[in-house]
Image (cartoon, helix red, strand yellow):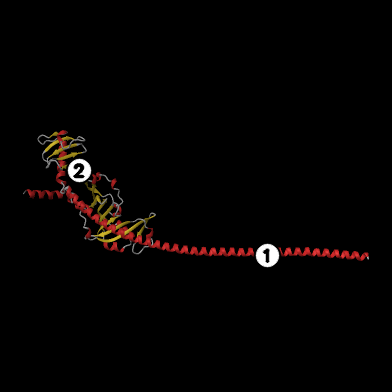
Amino acid sequence: MKELWKSFKLLFFFLIFPITAHSFELSEYGLDLNNFSELKELRTIYISDQSGELLYIDPENDTNNLSEIKDFKLNINFSSDESNKIYQFCCNSNQDTFLFVGTINNADEKFISLTSEKVLNLDNQIKVKNFLVFENNKLNKSVLIKDDKYNLLQINPDEQEYTLFFNSPLKFKDTISSVSKLKWSDFSPNDFNLQIVFNPSYINITDIATRISLYYLTNFDFNVVFDSKNNKVIYTDRDLKKIRYHGDYVEDADISNPASFLKPTLLNFLPTELKKILDKGREINLSYQPTHTLEELKNLIKISEKMNSEIVDFAKQKENELENIIQKKQAELKVEEERIKAEELKVAQLEEQKAEEERQRILDQQAEEENQRMLAEYAAADAKEKRQKYIKYGSIILLIGGLIAFIFLTNFLDN
């Protein structure tokens, strides 16, 4: 009979509080991803930002621009065993990674047949169910979109704290292009209806509208109902039936010793104000009691991290393949550049040799011309000297001849 009553309460709870039908199905947060072996690569797109313009790289057919690629990112799309369900990985294996899980009609046909640019534009059509962010290969946040609402799992690894936020009205489009542009730091817990915090010390469930929280303390035999709006606190037994202490919460109080700052509750009696707070705590306990432990949550998270790790390894393989092609192309271009440089050097050397020969020919010609000029000048000077000698000798002869004639004439006249 007791089991029948528990079953009836559970059925009644699902009817009255439909949020619970998925609130505690933690697997829906993307924590029960397919095994990587169950995924099939549909399309890998390599993208490089060249001066603000996206360059889509086709390693098999378009190798002309590969030598200019300095860095690139990946967009890897996988199909799963569910029809039209897509897993999309972005962006590099050595950075924080993003995994989208969504649906689109005729997925296989579209991802295989369309151009790279049109495949990326499918991000405007893919309906996202899960969005997971990994930092240093550890899950940082996971988003579940369902029934026009979204739910968020946020992880604080330093404090080993795992926070679930439930049922925020969808304020953005549920497409990859829209979700990827969101600034999650701008979102407030007040956007949600319910918050559950798991950490090693307690599980805390908070009704955000009333700001009333129920704490299941790990190492103590009591629960705590806390109204942060009115700063009221109530200590109860595990079943929230027997009330032990109540009163105003004191900052920095020793919560393990409620008697140090609270009044003991006599005869299980509470003032009306506190009774309403306790009733809300009991409603939370009945409606949203966790069905998963912290260790179970951690194990589910490890499943998603294992999947991400396997996808990252696959991404590294794809990156290495493209980098090898780029390096090969760059090596080929380097050889070609060196060949061209060698040919240009050879041509330049031949041109220089021809120029040198031409300069030498000109110098030889100039030297010959100078030699001919000097010979001509020498011949002219020699001829001039000879003419001068002839004139000199002629003048002497004429002078002598004149003297002889003068003497002869003188003698003739004397006779």
In front: 90, or 150?
Answer: 90
Whether label 1 touches label 2, CB < 8 Å: no
The quadrant where residue 380 appears? bottom right
- 1 left or right of 141 in image: left
Q: Secondary structure at mark 1?
A: helix
Q: Which residue is mark 1?
A: 376
Q: Quadrant of the C terminus?
A: bottom right
Amino acid residing under circle 2? Thr
Q: Position of residue 22 (x, y in %)?
A: 18, 51
Is residue 23 something one can see in this rendering?
A: no
Q: Which residue sits at x=60%, y=65%?
A: 365
Q: Is residue 318 left or right of residue 251?
A: right
Give the mark, 1 or 2, whose residue is nearer the N terminus.
2
Q: Tell me the residue at 19%/41% (across/down).
A: 212
Residue situated furthest left in the rendering: 1
Disc 2 marks which residue?
206
Circle 1 Cα neighbour tier, 10 Å, few/some/many (<14 / 14–19 / ≥20): few
